[in-house]
Image: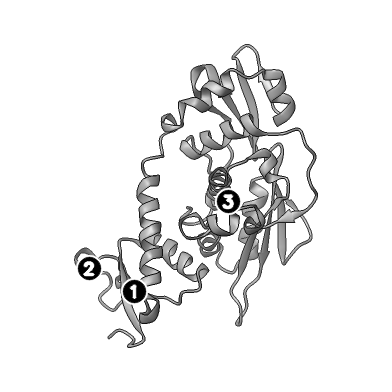
Amino acid sequence: MEDPAFVRVHALGNRFEADLLMTALEQEGIPAILRSFEETPYDGLFVPQKGWGLILVPEDQLEEASRLIEEILRDLESRRLYQDPDQVDELLWRQLDQLDPEDVCRRAQVSYDRDRSGYRVPFLTGTLCCLPGQRALELIEAPTGTRLDFQLVLVVLHYLLEAKATPLAGKWIGERDIPGGALFFRGPHAFPTGRLLQCFGDHREAFCRALEALGGVPVSHGDAAYRLWVLPRVPLLLIFWDGDEDFPAELKIRFDASIQDQLQALDTIWALINLVARGIAAPLPGGL
């Protein structure tokens, strides 16, 4: 029987949906119980009839939880429309094609291949080639977990268009410290740190191996931390705290305070983090 203090708010289709929604509810301070039909004595017998499982929430927070879940599922559905690189706005390609390559290279700290009329863009441990005239992005050396998709093309185009030749601020900030970030980076736009922690478990060693595989440099923060260069002017700091019997493991992502000098829009920053998270999780069981 359901706990009398909790009521059903959503039937789940799969484990991915469960992880996403439970993380979002937790970040919004809404207590939630996950009941998976796969983990019952019936060993998944009811999954085809009832779904993968249920989420239960306190009755007095049912309306708030329902609104949050509806927003996330709506966003998931819209994101499925934006997976193909060809769906990136043509205007971005046209704008880049009209810029002076020398200026782009100076601002973004990239190089220009005149034989191919394309920009060579360092990305994590690899190199990309952006060809505005062909409306194409190529993976010259693909970092772990990198695949050619909508988010990768979007981030690279915005970086080449927007990057400024300004020095780093030398101050690390969280996503909620970015103007507008406190409202934007929540619900469907929350960073996937919860799902990464599920990949790591409580194993700091797995975190360290994954970050080192992407070129991360150890720094002194938390129980383990790495500075990671995603793009030439975009460093990230990832900080891991071990869990114990009182507190779960925790993962935080920090930006140099100059981040919006290089990527202006919050949704582009969110896409950047999704790309990095995918690279981190690639060698781990399940990935992202």
For badge 3, the amino acid type reads Ile
Q: Nearer the viewer, residue 129 or 157?
A: 157
Q: Which quarter of the figure is the N terminus placed in?
A: bottom left
> Quick check: 142 left or right of 83?
right
Q: Quadrant of residue 258?
A: top right
- Measuring from the top left, give residue 229's x and y in whole percent: 69, 43
According to the image, what is the colour scheme of the structure?
A: one colour
Secondary structure under badge 1? helix
* Residue of label 2: 50
**Is tag 2's residue or tag 3's residue first in the polypeptide sequence?**
2
**Is tag 1's residue or tag 2's residue first in the polypeptide sequence?**
1
Identify the residue shown where x is 38% and y is 60%.
17
Residue 198, placed above or below residue 3: above
> Quick check: 29 left or right of 225?
left
For badge 2, the amino acid type reads Lys
In the picture, the disc for residue 280 is 3
Observer-side mark, 1 or 2, equals 2
- Measuring from the top left, give residue 248's x and y in whole percent: 58, 74
User: From mark 1 to mark 2, how far is it between C-alphas?
Assistant: 14 Å
Q: Crowding near pointer 3: few (<14 within 10 Å), some, many (20+)?
A: many
Q: Crowding near pointer 1: few (<14 within 10 Å), some, many (20+)?
A: few
Secondary structure under badge 3? helix
Q: Quadrant of residue 100?
A: top right
Circle 2/circle 3 CB separation < 8 Å: no
Q: Nearer the viewer, residue 219 or 184?
A: 184
Secondary structure under badge 2? helix
Observer-side mark, 2 or 3, equals 2
* Residue of label 1: 39
For badge 1, the amino acid type reads Glu
**Is tag 3's residue or tag 1's residue first in the polypeptide sequence?**
1
